[in-house]
Amino acid sequence: MCQANPSNLRDGFCIFINTLCQGPVPSVSDENGYTVFETEMKAQKEIADNQIIRLQQFLDGERHFEDAITVEEYIVPVSVHPDGVIVDECGRCFGPKPD
């Protein structure tokens, strides 16, 4: 179980996706770990940017229509621990770096 002093936590937003085996998991990361957006709007813009890329790939013949228009990502409020571990609203812990 993740434990930390609540005063050491910071709040943010992660983009999640539902997986068949693991259930809901963060879907955006880099070499430093899962990406935590400061605001919900920034996370929404990231999803929109990714959607634009998928639509352009469809227009360029690189992706099927159904795949291009389907948005599976959604935004979840999270708390970030000092060690980089994030905790979602259901208490699930992720990180600090993706496997």
Image (cartoon, grey):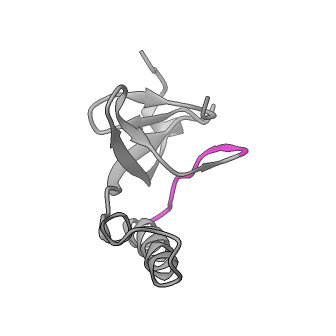
Find residue 5 and report its horizontal and vertical position in percent.
48, 28
Question: Which residue is depicted at the point 36% across and 47% down?
Answer: 17
* Rendered position, 88 above or below 5: below
In the image, farthest residue toward the right: 31
Q: Quadrant of residue 2?
A: top left
Find residue 87 and report its horizontal and vertical position in percent.
41, 34
Q: Quadrant of residue 91?
A: top left
Q: Nearer the viewer, residue 69 or 51?
A: 69
Magenta span has 55?
Answer: no
Left or right: 38 in relation to 21: right
Total label count?
0
Find residue 1 and report its horizontal and vertical position in percent.
41, 15
Residue span colored magenta: 31-39
Q: Quadrant of the C terminus?
A: top right
Magenta span has 38?
Answer: yes
Question: Which residue is depicted at the point 47% across and 47% down?
Answer: 27
Q: Nearer the viewer, residue 57 or 78?
A: 57
In the image, farthest residue toward the front: 61
* Rendered position, 12 above or below 93: below
Question: Which residue is depicted at the point 43% across and 27% down?
Answer: 93
In the image, farthest residue toward the left: 90
Find residue 90 and report its horizontal and vertical position in percent.
26, 32
Q: Nearer the viewer, residue 74 or 50?
A: 50
Q: Name the chief secondary structure element in magenta.
A: loop
* Rendered position, 6 above or below 1: below
Q: Nearer the viewer, residue 82 or 98?
A: 98
